[in-house]
Amino acid sequence: MKRIQTLVPAVLMLSACQFSVPHPDRETARLLKELDGYIQARDMYVVQKRNRIDALSNISREQADPGRRYELEMKTADEYFSFSFDSTQTYLKRCIDLAGTNLERAALASIRLAELYSKAGNYMEANEILYAQTDTTILDEAGKNAYMLALYNFSHDLSGNSGMVERLSIPPEAPYRDRLLQCLPENSETWRELLRDRFMAQGNLSAADSVSRVLMNNCRPEDRRYAIHAFYRSEIAGMDGRYAERLHWLVKSAECDIMNAVKDYASLTLVATDVLPTDVEHAFRYLQIAQQDALFYNAKLRPWQISRYLQEAQDAYIELQAKKQQTAQVLLILLGVLTVILLFLAHFLVTRSRKLTRMRHELENLNSRLETANITLNDLNRQITRADQVKRDYILEFLRDLSEQIAFLRSEDNHSRNLLKQGKANELLKELSINSHSEQAREKFYETFDRTFLGMYPHFIEDFNALLQEDARLSPPKGRLSTELRIFALICLGVDDSKQIASMLDYSVSTIYNYKVEVKNHALGERDAFEQTVKNLGK
């Protein structure tokens, strides 16, 4: 019998070792889970992007003044720049036509078109515009700086992707960068970006990282520029050998790209290549998504870049599926072996059936004890029923408030649709610019949530402060919760996903993360166990 008990786990351990699949470490798995949440919502971000573009296009079409329409169509082209190559090209060419006899405006639109071609890999077209068609004598100082920056970016892009085309005879990027650093306002965003590039080219990674930190601190995590700055931080970390930090910033960059409905990107592709050795399924799925977005954008550079990695990931994915199938076959064989062993054990147990009599007596005693415990359990159930009634009352009040908010929002939607049908888009924009209904609704939501939660857990603030150092304890107004308390109130209710908390409280994910870190830094106990301790409050 003992030999059989030893044999079963040994066989299972042998099969597990032979057919094991590599897995990412805990931090990488956490980052990928967070990124997956953004990917699931990417269709929503695309709808929001299209709505912004449609609203801007509608306003532009209503303009009779060519100058004003030129400005609006340039803004529309900027919205399309990382979303659709064809649409961006169409709008920029339209801006060139709208410029008419204003040669400076036409030149600025052409320079922007050259930047589009450069980013998309159309280097011959970009070269033709920048070096053969642009007349710099008609540009003012700002226009000349924009032209020089386009030359710098073109040289930089071409040097990084020269394998796609024949080598063009153009100056290197460094002289343009040095001249721009002298011409641009010191400490402006573009000036700092160029300074970061210079430090990276010189191998001064510490200084480059410091400049990148400043750039990131000057923009919000949901801004498009944040994705670009996060990408460069990943590049710096990778050059410095800090690969875990590189993956962290690549994920942050990819998340920001998704929030801004960017279709022409590199971050998600690089995330896939980094995790391919340990997580083939994630890598293959990310590369498929990146290829779909690149084809949607319809430029020739990005699909070519992605295809180099997609075949490798596809081969690894097929190999993984074959390995899983082989594992399943081995497990079926082991299942047959274990079935035989279990039959033998059943026979062995039947021969010892005389022990059942003693077990019956023990069960009778146990039943007697359970009957006694059941009386106590019934009392506890009655208390729980009363508590549930209280919670139901608060839930009904909460639902009534939500119903009122839905009715109000429906009324606002109908009002907005009527204005749009009447062609009063400008009036709608004016109302939206001064309307504070969303702030009032959010404050109403906070007030209702605070009242409801404190009604259910009247000692929550007192118990929560007991977990913190004395100088970090929170003292909100009576009957209200602070932002930190609302975050951990949701955690107490079982909502521990930062993205879900951010959505419910109308904050960004990074804001929620910063609040949680700040509170945990003042915890009396272990920081890693703090959230679990909060979940147990009131239980």
Image: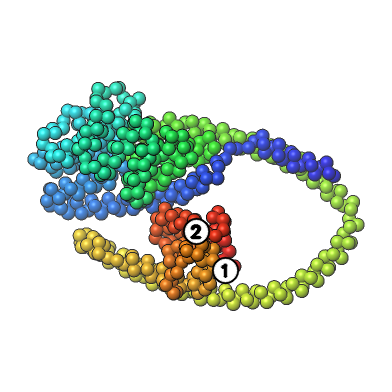
Q: Which amino acid does label 2 sit on?
A: His
Please give the name of the residue rendered at 74% of the width and 72% of the height, measured from the top-left corner: 373
Q: In this view, does 435 lie to the left or right of 308?
A: left
Which circle marks residue 538 in the picture? 1
Q: Mark 2 points at which residue?
A: 522
Residue 193, quarter of picture:
top left
Dot 1 lies on which element? loop
Q: Pick the residue in front: 334 or 282.
A: 282
Please rate how many residues cluster around mark 1, counting C-alpha atoms within 10 Å: few if below 14, some from 14 to 19, many from 20. Answer: few
Q: Pick the residue in front: 295 or 443.
A: 443
Please give the name of the residue rendered at 18% of the width and 40% of the height, measured from the top-left corner: 109
With respect to residue 433, does 63 lie above or below?
Answer: above
Q: In this view, does 184 lie to the left or right of 199?
A: left
Extreme residue toward the front, this view = 471
Give the mark, 2 or 1, whose residue is nearer the N terminus: 2
Q: Position of residue 492 (x, y in %)?
A: 53, 64
Dot 2 lies on which element? loop
